[in-house]
Amino acid sequence: MARRNWKYLVGGVLAMFGCALFEGVQFGAIVPLADRIFTNKPVVIPSGLPVFLGEWAKAVNAIDRSALFYGIIFLIPVFYVLKGTFTYLRGLFMNMLAQRSVADVRGDLFRKYQEFSLDFYSHKRQGELMSRITHDAPLIGHGLSYALTDVVYQGLLAVMFAAIALTISWKMVLIVAVVFPLNAGLIWVIGKTIKKQSIFSQESMADLNSIIAETNQGVAIVKAFGREEHEIERFDLANHRYYKAFMKSTRRNLVLSPVTEVLAALAIVVVFWMGGRSVLSGEMSFGVFGLFLTSLISIQRPIKKLAEVYGINQQALAASKRLYQILDIKPRIFDAPGAIICRAPQRVVRFEKVNFKYNKKEDRLTIQDFDHDFEVGKTTALVGPTGCGKTTTINLLLRFYDPDAGRILIDDQDIRSVTTASLRSHMALVTQEMVLFNETIRSNMQYGKLEASDEEILGALKKARAFEFVEKMPEGLDTVIGDRGFKLSGGQKQRLCIARAILKDPKILLLDEATSALDAESEHLVQQALDDLMRGRTVIVIAHRLSTIRNADCILVMDQGRIVEKGRHEELMTSSALYSKLA
């Protein structure tokens, strides 16, 4: 991230140097010059200071007061224009650094989400994953744009003012320096609590996002069961938890500034007493002492800012920790080194003694000794009671998971030896969940084939018996169908999903209750399209409806993760009690 955006950082730091330089020169010169002009007293530089300051004072004292007066009037706007230019560039570069960095973090995080297997998502809440992108990433940007800017810029100002003060009287500066270790220790202690509290605050925001996501996704169930008030109470509780966590962190952050200011003020009182005596005795001019005192007071501002920045940095560090908890996870499913392109199946898709379980700590297997050859060009149906492993079998073939034992082959290629992209390019999946996106019908269809023309899309819609309702849409293929296809009926959504699979023209077709949401008439129409689509392809179909599976070339009856019977419909009706019961 830093390597990609280094040019913004360099530009920002150079602009900060320009700002600090002009502020220091303007500050260090104007106070003594004003004293010379308005009091007509010479600028007196204490003995022991660098020779060039004495020479500068002699030159100033030799210039006519009127000339100095008009010179300052001319220089002040020039200095402010230059300083303003550098201030603009500083803000521009640092905001570009922050926003590009946030965009990069979001992109890296989203890319990482796409790499994870389904196993990762089964252990994470959707709201928590959303919160990492929408809440934690901007905290890092805030840390870069605000905190990093102030660390460098305020640090430069502190050094500039300290240099001016040291040049005038290093002894008095040492008195002020006594409070620095006290301030640093206090900032460190409070900063640690801020970081800890920020992590809790960010976790509370993740809880809040989870409730919002769950409620929005399940809005029909919430309303059907009349649980609106329950969800409101659940949200209010999480909302209040986040508020308390955020305010606790904020209170700790706010206390840094006044405490450091009070400690520094005590030291300045002592300096005022010592410097005042030097002015009264004539050892130092009032203008020089005024410059010294103003320098010390001005150091307060950057130090106070740095204390605030430390708290902000702790929040950004807490956000970074949460982000890297995700970014550092190694995906369980990945392409092996030297993975090759998967060839289209020619003979068989083979499961060899496959075992698999979702929870590796449990003894119970989801799939046990699964051994079967799915012949190319044939339709195989998987039937069995709920939880027997039918969908898991499809998920293993798609390599959403890897088997714990055994292997899966396409002809003679182990699917773990080929790239996942090339493996899945030969397959199309239609599930009962009807996954559609809040885009146009055209965009949803092109998930099946990105470069598909409108003619190809319309052809697939006709085959899936979806053309009629799409044609009646106000904007046709350009109609946006809403989140998860909210604007469509269940049957319409399912037919669009089937049309998407038809458009892909896959070698292996996977149907998981693909016609479950259709009424009898729609199912009959779509089944005709599916029959045409299945011809000449390798099809694995999961269904409870007899009409979907009775014509399958082979039916596998599964129970508790095992194949307990196999054969055609007529054979199983007479030989398998379990199949007869299911049918």
Image (cartoon, rainbow, N blue to C red):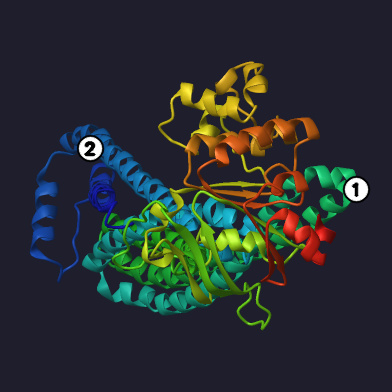
Residue 125 horizontal side relative to residue 113, left or right: right
Question: Whole-percent x and y of residue 237?
Answer: 79, 59
Question: Can you say which quadrant of the picture contains the C terminus?
Answer: bottom right
In the orientation shown, which residue stands out farthest toward the right?
226
| Residue at disc 2, secondary structure | helix
> Which disc number belongs to residue 192?
none
Is 527 in front, or is 31? 527
| Residue at disc 1, secondary structure | loop
> Which disc number belongs to residue 225?
1
Is 476 in front, or is 6? 476
Q: Could you say which quadrant of the image residue 394 lies in?
A: bottom right
Q: Counting other residues with Cα less than 10 Å from the Cα at mark 2, is it few (<14), some (14-19), or many (20 or more)? A: some
Is 440 in front, or is 315? 440
Above-or-below relation of 573 to 195: above
Residue 451 horizontal side relative to residue 583, left or right: left
In the rendered structure, which disc, 2 or 1, sits on the residue that comes first in sequence? 2
Q: Are marks 2 and 1 in contact (CB under 8 Å)?
A: no
Residue 202 horizontal side relative to residue 93, left or right: right
Above-or-below relation of 18 to 495: below
Question: Whole-percent x and y of residue 345?
Answer: 42, 53
User: CA gap, disc 2 to disc 1?
Assistant: 77 Å
Report which residue position mark 2 lands on. Answer: 72
